[in-house]
């Protein structure tokens, strides 16, 4: 879940890194349910049945913990959504792979209360600071990834030459949010079909 | 803001209703900033510089207050978005009016922290109860309003006969959420242009 565990030299250091992984995985799960603002060293200690002082040694402050949790979620997002989708063939197949894996991400077991980024977007849209900056940076990077995939689809001759890749990314983002809303709030059984059709319509408009 | 103020018979009753309006308008503003869960009789009393006991007499419990606030927001939404848009000519103009007023709603001065329904959607998607039911009912009604407008556009010959109005409503909802995300979190100056283009693309695909 976290990178760079292997290069640690001593068994104690490896055990420490492993403990941190378990703590952060639990924190991602908890934050998905209670929000990033509902997450604190105290609530996490209760969830893990660990002492608060032990967790303080790991994270020092609530804000530091929140930051580590967002950072873990971003690492997971890249590992589970972006990296595998970028292995799909260039062009339209890669655009579809990004969308499919994104939909799966929003229903992931390790985030039982829904996507951490959507929740944090609402919590932090009005709060300047390091957390907001990190979140915005991640969301812009995701939109840029979608736009790049659309641009590559134009290069491959799948999408038309005059397609605005940023507009395409914006609309694909909307299709993802509509799916999220239809599954999480409305519990609409047709949500997967609707999302699928939204992508077909976007692709139809984009095609050469 | 609240309905049925006029029929109250005594000056004291009218004054009471007027006080309630002011309190609820302040509560909508506050909930927009701190979330519906952050709203309590205590935080609202601080905001209004009123006594907590006076507010308890009005609302009895936090949940009751939250419900009244959501209900006030729904009344406002119908008055400011739905009712005026339904005065636009049947067909495509009405679809456009609904979209335009919805975008304006999400930037309304009286909700400085953003749309109460979006915030509440994230807060209550996992919490069964009266608040969630009321919220879901309102969101379904809004999707049904958009679908009805699309169906009327087909009847008028503006949209094609085989258009799926519920799919159209779902995609229009996504365009609204993408706009919200682009303005609130990303502060993207191109957000209005992107939203406008999203609607043009939706309408182009829907046209007869």
Image (cartoon, coloured by chain):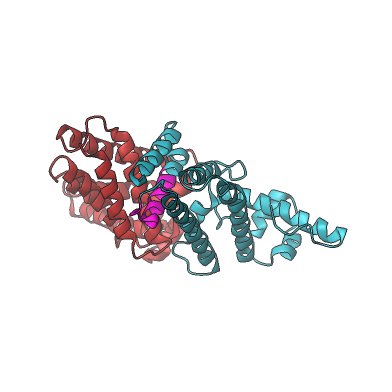
Chain colours: A cyan, B red
Relative to B5, is B56 on the left or the right?
right
Which residue is the extreme one toward the bottom?
Answer: A129
Residue A151 appears anywhere in the view: yes
Tell me what residue is drawn at x 74 percent, y 65 percent.
A57
Residue B38 appears anywhere in the view: no
- Write down the quadrant of residue B208 in the picture: top left
Q: Nearer the viewer, residue B169 or B204?
A: B204
* Magenta span main SS: helix
> From what the image shows, is residue B78 above or below residue A5?
above
Q: Which residues are magenta?
A: A161-178
Please state the horizontal and vertical placement of residue A54, each as a whole percent of the image: 76, 61
Q: Nearer the viewer, residue B119 or A16?
A: A16
Q: Nearer the viewer, residue B71 or A103?
A: A103
Please state the horizontal and vertical placement of residue A118, each as a whole percent of the image: 49, 52
> From what the image shows, is residue B86 above or below residue A75?
above
Please state the horizontal and vertical placement of residue B59, each as a whole percent of the image: 38, 50
Tell me what residue is drawn at x 67 percent, y 50 percent.
A25
Please state the horizontal and vertical placement of residue A165, each as a whole percent of the image: 39, 55
């Amino acid at each position: 879940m976290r990178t760079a565990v292997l290069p640690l030299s001593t068994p104690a250091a490896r055990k420490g890194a492993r403990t941190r992984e378990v703590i952060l995985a639990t924190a991602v799960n908890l934050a998905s349910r209670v929000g990033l603002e509902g997450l604190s060293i105290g609530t996490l200690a209760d969830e893990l049945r660990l002492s608060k002082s032990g967790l303080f040694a790991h994270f020092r402050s609530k804000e530091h913990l929140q930051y580590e949790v967002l950072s873990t979620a971003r690492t997971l997002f890249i590992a589970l959504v972006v990296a595998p989708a970028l292995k799909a063939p260039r062009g339209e197949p890669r655009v579809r792979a990004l969308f499919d894996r994104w939909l799966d991400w929003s229903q992931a077991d390790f985030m039982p209360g829904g996507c951490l980024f959507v929740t944090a977007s609402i919590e932090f849209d009005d709060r300047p600071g390091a957390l907001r900056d990190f979140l915005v940076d991640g969301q812009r990077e995701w939109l840029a990834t979608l736009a790049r995939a659309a641009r590559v689809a134009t290069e491959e001759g799948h999408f038309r030459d005059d397609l605005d890749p940023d507009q395409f990314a914006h609309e694909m983002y909307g299709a993802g949010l509509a799916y999220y809303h239809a599954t999480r709030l409305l519990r609409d059984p047709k949500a997967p079909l609707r999302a699928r059709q939204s992508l077909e319509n976007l692709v139809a408009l984009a095609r050469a």
